[in-house]
Image: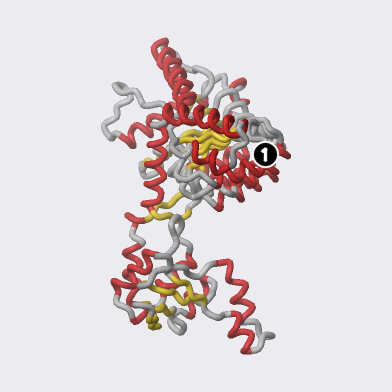
């Protein structure tokens, strides 16, 4: 069953309807209810009036929403606040807030006072996850994203093999001048499909092919194809991606800047299905200004688990803004910031974002991030006193204490999450362990990237 409800985009229509310059007939026409059928013979039709959030809260009692109950094609209109609590709760569960709790979707929740307690129970802490810049999300959606990312990590070897097979089949299909449907059918049995833009030079074929894929992990390889080709061929193709697919996008080395990143982000927002994104080697930041599209990427709810930002010009100012967003990101597992312009302060800010202790002794941690790579930054040449390493060590101990209250730094070795340059330690044993961890970091990073 599909139920639609009030959207923010309709606020303009509401304002027009209540403009004093409009006559009553125009106003009535502008705020005419939307009838949204469930598409079934027996179901519900929601009759909603377009109102912004503030108006919803102020006028819900005077103008409650109505629904149409359809039974054997005999519709019967009824006010939502006259329905039993159980049915209203059911309707609320069917609202299209798959990811976010958009305030405009609470129109049903304020149709009568008695239902406030039901909605409050529905929005209990157990059902809400706060993340991506303080947004409220349905916890089950975030858990699903996390589970899918774990599954992908376990299936990396299989996916890589399928990627190789898919490229061969696609190349054969193109050589045989097969149509798009035939090529898509030949790779439909694979769990992963790689679409290499250098192999598929036809923009129309790329878009048609990506639109034919369903329930698969898709890797779009668009490395070093140039900014113009990326904008004209890759972005339109990404817009055709079906919701059931997951996306790994390699857009490295294309001279993408802030404007182009915003265009990419606009596409990704419409279908939050990206799991890995490689933007390395693009001059996203060329001055001291904040790169807002980049920060918006961290604030956009999605299953993005691996983000590669090496050689993108990230400086301390942007690192500080990124660190604020790392603290509550529930999905990001791997963040590569190597070869940028991070000083000691910038590196420390990012490291402290993973774990901090309040004055009361409460430890706040980000347990999702498994790898933060900070090598070859500006601090590497200036941190003679090992300040960054000390911050790393303290953060690792806080993370270990949060996961294990019995953690003893004298007896236990914390699991490393952060990778930096320089070994500012006195013990040969500690130095050897650090080298071992660095090797493990590199091996894991190589294995996890699709």
Q: Identify the residue at horizontal 60%, vertical 30% (top origin).
A: 310
Above or below, 244 relative to 428:
below
Residue 260 versus residue 317: which sits nearer the camera? Answer: 260
- Crowding near the residue tagged with mark 1, few <14, some 14–19, many ≥20 C-alpha atoms within 10 Å: few
Q: Identify the residue at horizontal 38%, vertical 55% (top origin).
A: 128
Residue tagged by mark 1?
202
Q: Position of residue 339 (x, y in %)?
A: 61, 26
Quick check: can you spot residue 97? yes
Q: Position of residue 326 (x, y in %)?
A: 49, 41
Residue 89 versus residue 216: which sits nearer the camera? Answer: 216
The residue most toward the bottom is 24
Quadrant the N terminus occupies: bottom left
Determine the secondary structure under disc 1.
loop
Does residue 351 appear to the left or right of 411 in the view shown?
right
Image coloring type: secondary structure
The residue most toward the left is 406
Residue 369, by quadrant, is top left
């Amino acid at each position: 069953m599909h139920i639609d409800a009030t959207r923010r985009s309709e606020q303009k229509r509401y304002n027009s309807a209540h403009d004093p310059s409009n006559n009553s007939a125009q106003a009535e026409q502008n705020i005419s209810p939307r009838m949204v059928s469930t598409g079934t013979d027996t179901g519900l039709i929601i009759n909603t009036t377009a109102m912004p959030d503030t108006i919803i809260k102020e006028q819900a009692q005077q103008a409650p929403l109505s629904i149409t109950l359809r039974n054997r094609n005999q519709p019967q209109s009824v006010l939502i606040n006259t329905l039993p609590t159980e049915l209203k709760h059911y309707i609320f569960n069917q609202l299209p807030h798959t990811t976010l709790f958009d305030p405009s979707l609470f129109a049903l929740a304020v149709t009568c006072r008695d239902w406030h307690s039901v909605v409050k129970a529905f929005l209990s802490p157990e059902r809400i996850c706060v993340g991506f810049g303080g947004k409220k999300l349905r916890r089950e959606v975030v858990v699903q994203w996390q589970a899918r990312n774990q599954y992908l990590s376990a299936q990396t070897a299989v996916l890589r093999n399928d990627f190789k097979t898919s490229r061969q089949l696609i190349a054969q299909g193109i050589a045989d001048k097969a149509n798009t449907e035939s090529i898509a059918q030949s790779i439909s049995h694979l769990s992963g499909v790689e679409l290499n833009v250098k192999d598929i030079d036809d923009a129309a074929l790329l878009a048609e092919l990506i639109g034919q894929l369903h329930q698969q992990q898709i890797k779009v390889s668009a490395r070093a194809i140039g900014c113009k080709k990326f904008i004209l061929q890759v972005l339109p193709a990404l817009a055709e991606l079906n919701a059931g697919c997951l996306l790994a996008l390699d857009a490295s080395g294309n001279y993408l800047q802030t404007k182009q990143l915003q265009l990419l982000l606009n596409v990704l927002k419409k279908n939050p299905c990206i799991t890995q994104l490689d933007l390395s080697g693009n001059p996203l930041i060329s001055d001291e200004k904040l790169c807002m599209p980049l920060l918006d990427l961290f604030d956009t709810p999605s299953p993005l688990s691996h983000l590669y930002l090496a050689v993108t010009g990230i400086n301390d100012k942007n690192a500080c803004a990124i660190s604020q967003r790392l603290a509550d990101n529930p999905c990001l597992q791997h963040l590569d910031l190597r070869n940028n312009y991070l000083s000691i302060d910038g590196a420390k800010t990012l490291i402290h974002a993973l774990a901090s202790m309040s004055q009361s002794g409460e430890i706040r941690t980000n347990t999702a991030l498994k790898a933060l790579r900070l090598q070859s930054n500006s601090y590497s040449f200036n941190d003679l006193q090992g300040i960054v390493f000390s911050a790393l060590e303290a953060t690792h101990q806080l993370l270990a204490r949060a996961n294990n209250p019995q953690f003893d730094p004298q007896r236990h070795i914390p699991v490393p999450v952060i990778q930096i340059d320089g070994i500012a330690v006195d013990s040969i044993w500690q130095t050897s362990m650090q080298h071992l961890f660095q090797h493990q970091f590199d091996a894991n990073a190589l294995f996890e990237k699709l």
